Amino acid sequence: MAPEVQPPDAEMLELQRRLENLQLTKDCDTLERAANVAAKILRDLNVSIDPSDDDSFQWKESMQGLLTLPRPRVVVGVVGNTGAGKSSVINAVLDEGQ
């Protein structure tokens, strides 16, 4: 007999709404914080799941796979003539993030 599917409760619906809104954000700091929270949740879930049955074991493997994905590396190149202000632009951008 198939397990009974429970309707989503209010807490789950709120979580779904917040995740959908998060997908729309363009703010890198917000996305970075959300990724860190999600990674912590996955680590906590991974610890709490009993891997004794095949489904749980597959869940744990999937979560571990997500946690070990390499982070994308960004390389930025700035070119221009001598004295054009390349260093000034880089310093301004880097200082803005602090």
Image (cartoon, helix red, strand yellow):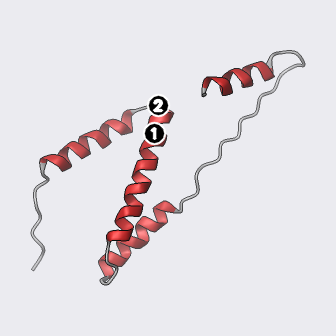
Residue 27 has which mark? 2
Tell me if residue 29 comes above or below residue 95 in the rendering: below
Q: Amino acid at mark 2?
A: Asp
Classify the position of the N terminus by image quarter: bottom left
Q: Determine which quarter of the picture holds residue 23.
A: top left
Tell me if residue 67 comes above or below residue 27 in the rendering: below
Q: Name the spot of residue 2 as percent of width and height, x first.
A: 12, 76
Q: Residue at the spot x=41%, y=49% of the render?
A: 37
Real-space Cα separation, disc 2 to disc 1, in angstroms: 6 Å
> What residue would you read off at disc 1?
31
Q: Name the spot of residue 16 as percent of width and height, x first.
A: 25, 45
Q: Name the spot of residue 12 as percent of width and height, x first.
A: 19, 50
Classify the position of the C terminus by image quarter: top right
Q: Residue at the spot x=77%, y=19% of the render?
A: 88
Tell me if residue 38 comes above or below residue 30 in the rendering: below
Q: Determine which quarter of the picture holds residue 60.
A: bottom left
Side of 75 where 29 appears, left or right: left
Judged from the image, the secondary structure of the residue bearing numbered disc 2 is loop
Q: Residue at the spot x=12%, y=64% of the render?
A: 5
Residue 13 has which mark? none
Q: Name the spot of residue 22 as percent of width and height, x first.
A: 36, 38
